[in-house]
Image (cartoon, rainbow, N blue to C red):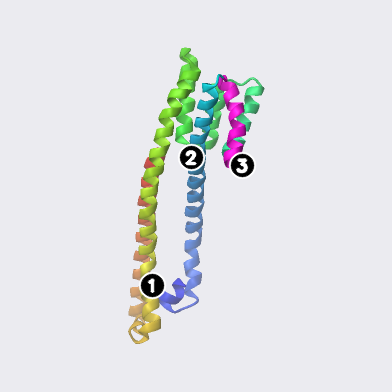
Amino acid sequence: MTAWLFFDFAWVSLLLLLYVPVALILRKKELIRKKKWELNLAFKDALVCLENSLAVGYSPESSVRESIKNLEQLHGRDHDICREFRVMAKQMDLGTGMEEVFLEFGKRTDVEDIKQLADIFAVVKRTGGNLSQVLRQTGSVLQDKIELKRELRTTIAAKQMEFQIMCAVPYGILLYLKLCAPTMSNALYHNFFGILFMWGVLGAHFGLKLLGEKMIRGEVGKLEG
């Protein structure tokens, strides 16, 4: 589509294939961020389950095991959060301390909120604090933080939609010219000046698109941090 609209040459699509590796790398990074965010949201539900279990008298270790049942009902057995909690329960069955289990959980997932909770657990363990009380207090703070992130991401998502529409505008303009005003668009094709001009337009379009995506990723990165 790009080769046809910008150059009216099918062979130009071979040159544009050079952009495919870049697009695939960006897509992979975006999928990783999306997966981490989904895990972050599920972790909020896990904190609620842990708090409820602690409230009815379960120990922190038993709360992890009890939360697995509730999380499987909420998200399904194959969800990442359920698999992670099953791994943690198995580690505790083998004698690993809860603070170590959460530290490994944070390292595996690389989710900031999980790593923060793990760090707090480690400090409490070293200082001899009340792990159950800390879990309830920290869980409440992290839940509020995750909820605020969700609201901010909703705002950013609206800006992303506007950005995608803006990126599609040049294609719409060129398609309109080719279909409805071919005499005007013919000057842009099959001549040195037209080809040079269209390469400039396409380069500016891709450059601004990458810049916009970088700015959006930066805003999302601030939320994750």
Q: Earlier in the sequence, mark 1 or mark 3?
A: 3
Q: Residue 58, how many percent across, how many down? A: 57, 20
Which of 71 and 122 lies nearest the eye of the viewer?
71
Q: Is residue 75 magenta?
A: yes
Type of amino acid at the residue the image marks with label 2: Leu
- Of the image marks 3 and 2, the number of the one nearer the N terminus: 2
- Residue 209, magenta (yes or no): no
Q: Residues in magenta?
A: 58-77
Residue 41 is labelled as 2
Q: Amino acid at mark 1?
A: Gly
Residue 45, image x, y percentages: 51, 35
Query: Is residue 49 or residue 198 the one in the foreground?
Result: 49
Q: Is residue 183 above or below residue 3?
A: below
In the depicted structure, whether residue 51 falls above or below residue 23: above
| Mark 1: few/some/many CA within 10 Å (<14, 14-19, 20+) | few
Q: Nearer the viewer, mark 1 or mark 3?
A: 3
Residue at x 63%, y 31% (from the top left corner): 87
Q: Secondary structure at mark 2?
A: helix
Within-10-Å neighbours for mark 3: few <14, some 14–19, many 20+: some
Per the rendering, the mark at residue 155 is none
Looking at numbered disc 3 in the image, what kind of residue is underneath it? Gly
Query: Is any atom of residue 112 visible in this view?
Result: yes
Q: Badge 1 is on which residue?
A: 172
Distance from label 3 to label 2 (Cα)?
14 Å
How far apart are the two marked residues, 1 and 3, measured between alpha carbons? 42 Å
State the predominant SS element of the stretch in magenta. Answer: helix
Q: Relative to 219, is 197 above or below?
A: below
Q: Which mark is residue 76?
A: 3
